[in-house]
Amino acid sequence: MTIVIAFLAVVGAIAGWWLSSQRLMSKPWLETGALDDVPGSGAPLPAAKIGLGIFLAVAGSLFALSISAYSMRLQGLDWWPLPVPKLLWFSTALLILASAALEWAKASARRANMSDVRLGLMAAGSFSIAFLGCQLLAWQQLNEAGYLLASNPANSFFYLITGLHGLHVLGGLAALGQVTVRAQRTRDVGQVRLGVELCTTYWHFLLLVWLIIFALLAGWAGEFLAICRQVLS
């Protein structure tokens, strides 16, 4: 349960910061002054942002449970860790670039620079598709090396966790594709600003989750888990 507590603490801290920045936790009835002078009083939080926040909380809990099961199962005597394919290093860099491209698109939308918004969206989509391609190639390399899905619990968890993350990336690509098409058809940044912000938040979440997964699969999280068990014991 240690990894669950640690992961949920990180997700909770990020969710709290995000909700605070969106003024969802504000109390406008306690504000003084004219209604128009109250910060955020004239701009209610879009339902899409609330929906995304709820979805990220649910998805974060799902990943936390999966990672917790992985960390507990690796203590078994029948656990034989498989080597981490070198392609995962490259795919990690691609996901970082995708997240950075969306952050750039978000900043460009605030500057009303539509050409840079389009470029950032297309770059993020390309990097994300390449990320999924690298994941599939890594799976193929492991299968050819004999690390099959059902041959070892470590193999099963590797395919399960990386596949679960890949499905979330694939789902995000569907939304990103819609925003990109909309950006190509309009010159009004206001029509795509919200979509760009939502995609950026989602990709930052995917990157955070993947970095935790990668650290766990690579074995770097072992010492951290040991420290957490000592602190909580």
Image (cartoon, rainbow, N blue to C red):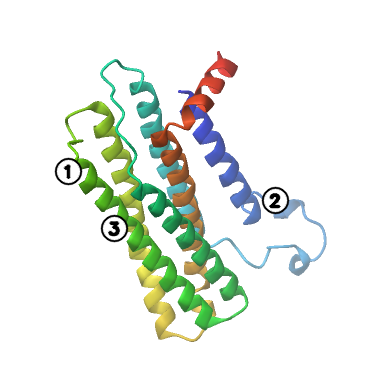
Residue at the (49%, 68%) spot, across then down: 196
Q: Nearer the viewer, mark 2 or mark 3?
A: 3
Query: Which element type, helix, strand or loop, lies under badge 1?
Result: helix
The secondary structure type at the circle numbered 2 is loop
Residue named by callout 1: 144
Q: Amino acid at mark 1?
A: Glu
Residue 43 percent across, percent down from the top left: 63, 66
| Residue found at the very far right of the displayed protein | 33
- Point out which mark residue 27 bears: 2
Q: Amino acid at mark 2?
A: Lys
Q: CA distance from mark 2 to mark 3?
A: 46 Å
x, y percent for residue 82: 29, 33
Q: Residue 214 in the image: state x and y as whole percent.
A: 42, 41
Disc nearest the viewer among 3 and 1: 1
- Viewer-proximal residue among 178 and 209: 209
In the rendered view, tell whether residue 6 sits above or below residue 175.
Answer: above
Pick whichever of labels 3 and 1 is earlier in the sequence. 3
Q: Which residue is mark 3?
A: 133
Q: Callout 1: 10 Å neighbours few (<14), some, many (20+)?
A: few
Nearest to the observer: residue 206 or residue 79? 79
Q: Specify the quadrant that holds the N terminus.
A: top left
Residue at the far top in the pictured view:
233
Contact, mark 1 vs mark 2 (Cβ under 8 Å): no
174 vs 212: above or below: below
2 or 3: tag closer to the N-terminus: 2
User: Is disc 3 in contact with disc 1, using a CB cutoff of under 8 Å?
Assistant: no
Q: Earlier in the sequence, mark 1 or mark 2?
A: 2
Horizontal side of 153 relative to 23 (left or right) equals left
Q: Secondary structure at mark 3?
A: helix
Q: CA distance from mark 3 to mark 1?
A: 17 Å
Is residue 87 rendered to the left or right of residue 108? left
